[in-house]
Amino acid sequence: MGKKLSKKQESSETVHSQRIDEIMKTDNNEVQKEIKILVLGTGDSGKSTFLKQLQILYKGGFCEQDRFLYRTTIRVNLMYNMKTLIQIVEDLKITIQKRTQKIVKRFDRSKKYCEENLTEKMKNAIINLWNDPGFKQAYERRNRFELSDSANYYFDSCERIFKEEYQPNDKDILFCRIPTTGVNEIELEVNNKFWKVVDVGGQRSERRKWIHQFESATIVVYFKNWRLTSNNKLKKKKKNHYCIQ
Ligand SMILES: Nc1nc2c(ncn2[C@@H]2O[C@H](COP(=O)(O)OP(=O)(O)OP(=O)(O)O)[C@@H](O)[C@H]2O)c(=O)[nH]1
Ligand SMILES: [Mg+2]
């Protein structure tokens, strides 16, 4: 009797154990299925650009609402970039044409640009200034200043960007710089696996938030800004101005 009961007990324990094994296997598979990639790096190193590329490659690109939001930023950035380039021309005392000097004097150097500054006059001013070889020379020397590497792309596209019906294409969006505050996430399903890619802000004030993201990270990817290599350190001199140490 006792022997029979023990056999029953044994088989029930085996079933129980098998069940636990199955649950653990399923749980393990679930955990393995979601891979969290934490993207770290200093500001302007290309973290958010990487997420945009993933959006294009795996999520069907950008919706109309996204494009509309980028449109305003691209236009406003374009004006700020020209304002910075004028500052570079002046600071470096680069020779520019007489006709261009007049445009510089009349250039609207607003503290805060918005869509209202997008006038025909502004568009012509940017195109004319950019056509001056002195401005191209200033752009080549931008590494001493806070001017985006993609500024030339937007200056070249000024006519198109100022058009009323302008809708940014994927390249326009990839080049658009918006410093991240907080956390951006994108979830993807690739090769039967779920990937969560987490992008954080790399500006100094944002870095204290990184610690909260490490816990469940499977992979950490660190992006490096080529401008900030040890031989090419940028030291802030005054607002918007950097110099190489
Ligand atoms: N030419 C070129 N430009 C790039 C490349 N990757 C990124 N950029 C540009 O460099 C800038 C990087 O900006 P973000 O991707 O917003 O940088 P980030 O690391 O997210 O910066 P924070 O959000 O401030 O931490 C953008 O203007 C991009 O267009 C690249 O491979 N080639
Ligand atoms: Mg970013």
Image (cartoon, helix red, strand yellow):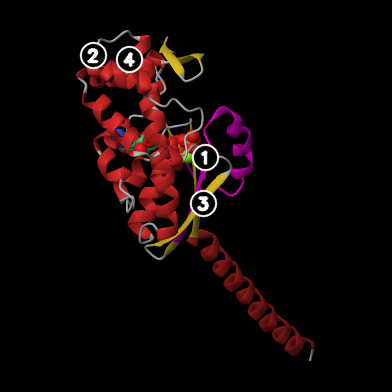
**Alpha-carbon span between mark 3 and mark 4:** 39 Å
**Alpha-carbon span between mark 1 and mark 2:** 40 Å
Q: Which numbered circle lies on residue 89? A: 4
**Alpha-carbon span between mark 2 and mark 4:** 14 Å
Q: Which residue occupies the foreground of this view, 194 or 1?
A: 194
Q: In the rendered view, would you say 49 is above or below 89? A: below
Q: Which numbered circle lies on residue 98? A: 2
Q: Nearer the viewer, mark 1 or mark 2?
A: 2
Residue drawn at point x = 42 percent, y = 12 percent: 243
* The magenta segment: 194-220
Q: Nearer the viewer, mark 3 or mark 4?
A: 4
**Dot 2 and dot 3 residues touching (CB under 8 Å):** no
Q: Which residue occupies the foreground of this view, 164 or 78?
A: 164
Q: Nearer the viewer, mark 1 or mark 4?
A: 4
Q: Would you say the beta carbon of the disc 3 residue lies within 8 angstroms of ligand 2?
A: no
Point out the tag, 3 or 4, that comes first from the N-terminus: 4
Magenta-colored stretch includes residue 198: yes
Point out the tag, 1 or 3, that comes first from the N-terminus: 1
Q: In the rendered view, would you say 123 is above or below 4? A: above
Which residue is the site of mark 3?
Answer: 185
Q: Secondary structure at mark 2?
A: helix
Q: In the rendered view, would you say 9 is above or below 99? A: below
In the orientation shown, which residue stands out farthest toward the right?
Answer: 2
Q: Amino acid at mark 3?
A: Glu
Q: Amino acid at mark 1?
A: Thr
Q: Which numbered circle lies on residue 180? A: 1
